[in-house]
């Protein structure tokens, strides 16, 4: 009888230990789910604005750009990057439609970036690329080019009003797929295409929520 009671007690302890292990495992899974869900929802925020990025194994958000955060001689506010060739300040933001991105840039006294040379285009890419192959066009970067007066005019114009004197479209672009692509993005990361359009531009729906966009404003003097 004593041996039976002892075995019963051991069995109960084993069951309790198993139950505790199960609860612990379940709580870890739940916590991981919550963290992942929060991070995924933060696609709508500027979670990437201040590196280092909060990577976790469960993080399903796209990686953050590898761009420099510098200001030169007080010409740019903290968090903006000065580019001598244009005497302007730039900053990368995240997750917005074209119109929302432009409004955000205007709130800082600028506009979505205009681009007027290969060098400036390379700089914009440096500001916004992640170093990972993009898996969808939403993973690229808005620039401030659009067909603002369509269908009255098919001309492409910059939101900052500067001249359109540089248009490195990707091959076959702009193609106005499905008849409603009125805004432009830059291929700021490599793709899987045989003819990788990295660094080139593409027309796309303005209401897409793009992974990143670059604001540009004049430097302070």
Image: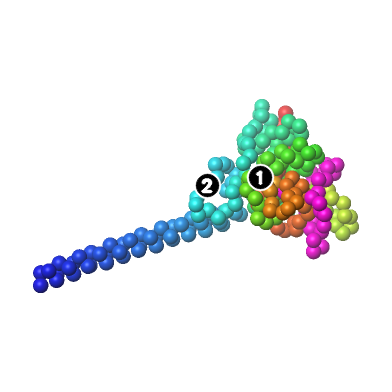
Q: Position of residue 190 (x, y in %)?
A: 69, 48
Q: Nearer the viewer, residue 14 or 77?
A: 14
Magenta residues, dominant SS class: loop
Tag 2, which secondary structure? loop
Identify the magenta region.
159-187
At 15% from the left and 67% from the top, the residue drawn is 6
Q: Which residue is mark 2?
A: 54
Farthest residue to the right: give it: 152
Farthest residue to the top: give it: 73
Colouring scheme applied when the structure was drawn: rainbow
* Quarter of image, res 28: bottom left
Q: Which residue is mark 1?
A: 129
Would residue 175 appear left or right of 190 to someone viewing this image? right
Q: Nearer the viewer, residue 188 or 84?
A: 188
In the image, residue 17 above or below residue 115: below
Packing grade of label 2 (10 A; few <14, some 14-19, many >=20) is few
């Amino acid at each position: 009888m004593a041996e039976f009671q002892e075995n019963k007690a051991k069995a109960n302890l084993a069951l309790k230990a198993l139950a505790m292990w199960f609860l612990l495992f379940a709580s870890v899974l739940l916590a991981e789910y919550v963290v992942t869900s929060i991070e995924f929802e933060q696609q709508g925020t500027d979670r990437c604005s201040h590196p280092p990025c909060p990577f976790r194994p469960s993080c399903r958000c796209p990686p953050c750009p590898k761009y420099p955060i510098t200001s030169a001689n007080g010409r740019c506010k903290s968090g903006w990057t000065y580019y001598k060739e244009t005497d302007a300040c730039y900053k990368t933001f995240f997750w917005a439609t074209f119109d929302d991105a432009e409004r955000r840039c205007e709130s800082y006294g600028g506009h979505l970036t205009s681009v007027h040379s290969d060098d400036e285009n390379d700089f914009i890419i440096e500001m916004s690329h992640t170093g990972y192959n993009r898996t969808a066009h939403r993973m690229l970067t808005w620039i401030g080019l659009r067909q603002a007066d369509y269908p009255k005019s098919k001309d492409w114009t910059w939101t900052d009003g500067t001249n359109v004197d540089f248009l490195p479209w990707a091959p076959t672009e702009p193609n106005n797929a499905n008849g409603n692509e009125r805004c432009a993005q830059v291929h700021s990361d490599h793709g899987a295409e045989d003819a990788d359009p990295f660094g080139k531009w593409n027309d796309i729906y303005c209401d897409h929520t793009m992974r990143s966009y670059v604001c540009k404003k004049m430097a302070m003097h």
